[in-house]
Image: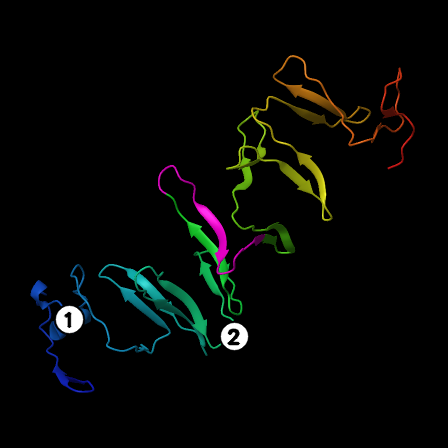
């Protein structure tokens, strides 16, 4: 039989059923096509590629790419399809691309397990910022990063109802939070850390700073805040490894330490015991 090409004709010989495929036949047009028909090409290195982009429709709703033993890849057709998956090779230093494309303005990409959808990549108009997942070798921590072409790129974590947490990027970031879980009997930790010798920890409300935890070298003593059950008193205490730890309340400038409904047994300079309404 003959197969017409733009500038020449190849004669294709169909070999006998059961004929053994030889390694010397690899990339030979006649033997390769016959081997594909017979499903004998398992285990041989071979290269087939078109000179120009082309598309092939097998005319069936389910197209399977298989080896001798089982289906390796299956492509399912849908009625009136307009969107599709594209795989792009890449030059040196560029990533290989797996991309959802089609005639729709935006085309999402859904990754599914046998049970259902596990991950969806939502399309947007002209995206330039994205998530990057970086594995690491032994001893390293994998990284999930908000990155892209903008100078700074923040990110958000959202539930179905809306944004639950937002991360604001800064240029030349060196300090960050460290979250550490705890084994039985040990409290989890949220720590300010980084490359600076000391790193303060600020808590802000929407309008400004509400609390600042000041870092020092070699901290051993700290403030402890204890809630209470019904009828008990809430406590603020000095604690640490020293046998005795003072507690200092230091107003700024000429300010006072004030207490509401305070009981004071003696005069204390700088303390106002007048009722205060918050």
Quarter of the figure with residue 6: bottom left
**Residue sitting at 33 percent across and 78 percent down?**
59
Quarter of the image with the N terminus is bottom left
Query: How many residues crowd mark 1 within 10 Å: few (<14), some (14–19), many (20+)?
Result: many
Image disc number at residue 109 = none
Whether 154 is among the magenta residues is yes
- Taking 65 as reference, is 257 above or below it? above
Q: Is residue 1 visible?
A: no
Q: Which residue is mark 1?
A: 32
Magenta portion: prevailing SS class:
loop
Q: Are marks 2 and 1 in contact (CB under 8 Å)?
A: no
Whether 217 is among the magenta residues is no
Residue 75 placed where, x, y %?
36, 68
Q: Secondary structure at mark 1?
A: helix
Q: In the image, which is nearer the foreground, mark 2 or mark 1?
A: 2
**Residue sitting at 88 percent across and 19 percent down?**
264
Q: Is residue 14 visible?
A: yes
Q: Quick one: 35 or 233, which is closer to the camera?
A: 233
Task: Determine the residue located farthest toward the top in the rendered image.
Answer: 243
Quarter of the figure with residue 81: bottom left
Residue 62 placed where, x, y %?
36, 71
Q: Residue 243 vs residue 93: left or right?
A: right
Magenta part of the chain: 137-156
Residue 102 placed where, x, y %?
45, 75
**Residue sitting at 35 percent across and 62 percent down?**
96
Q: Residue 261 vs residue 187: left or right?
A: right
Image disc number at residue 105 = 2
Residue 35 placed where, x, y %?
15, 69
Q: CA distance from mark 2 to mark 1?
A: 41 Å
Query: How many residues crowd mark 2 within 10 Å: few (<14), some (14–19), many (20+)?
Result: few
Q: Residue 21 vs residue 226: left or right?
A: left
Q: Nearer the N terminus, badge 2 or badge 1?
A: 1
């Amino acid at each position: 039989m003959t197969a017409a090409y733009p500038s020449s004709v190849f004669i294709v010989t169909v070999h006998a059923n059961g004929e053994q495929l030889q390694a010397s036949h690899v990339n030979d047009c006649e033997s390769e096509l016959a081997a594909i028909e017979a499903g004998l090409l398992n285990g041989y290195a071979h290269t087939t590629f078109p000179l120009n982009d082309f598309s092939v429709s097998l005319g069936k709703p389910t197209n399977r790419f298989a080896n001798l033993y089982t289906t390796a890849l299956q492509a399912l057709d849908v009625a009136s399809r307009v969107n599709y998956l594209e795989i792009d090779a890449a030059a040196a230093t560029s990533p290989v691309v797996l991309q959802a494309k089609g005639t729709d303005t935006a085309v999402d990409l859904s990754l599914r397990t046998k049970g259902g959808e596990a991950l969806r990549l939502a399309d947007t108009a002209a995206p330039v910022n994205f998530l990057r997942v970086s594995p690491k070798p032994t001893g390293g921590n994998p990284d999930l990063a908000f990155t892209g072409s903008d100078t700074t790129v923040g990110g958000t974590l959202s539930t179905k109802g809306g944004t639950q947490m937002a991360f604001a990027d800064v240029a030349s970031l060196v300090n960050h939070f460290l979250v550490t879980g705890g084994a039985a009997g040990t409290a989890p930790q949220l720590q300010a850390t980084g490359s600076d010798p000391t790193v303060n920890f600020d808590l802000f409300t929407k309008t400004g700073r509400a609390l600042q935890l000041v870092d020092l070298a070699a901290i051993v003593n700290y403030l402890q805040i204890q809630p209470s059950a019904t009828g008990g008193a809430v406590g603020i205490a000095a604690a640490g490894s020293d046998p005795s730890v003072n507690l200092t309340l230091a107003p700024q400038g000429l300010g006072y330490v004030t207490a509401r409904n305070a009981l004071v047994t003696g005069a204390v300079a700088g303390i106002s015991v007048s009722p205060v309404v918050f």
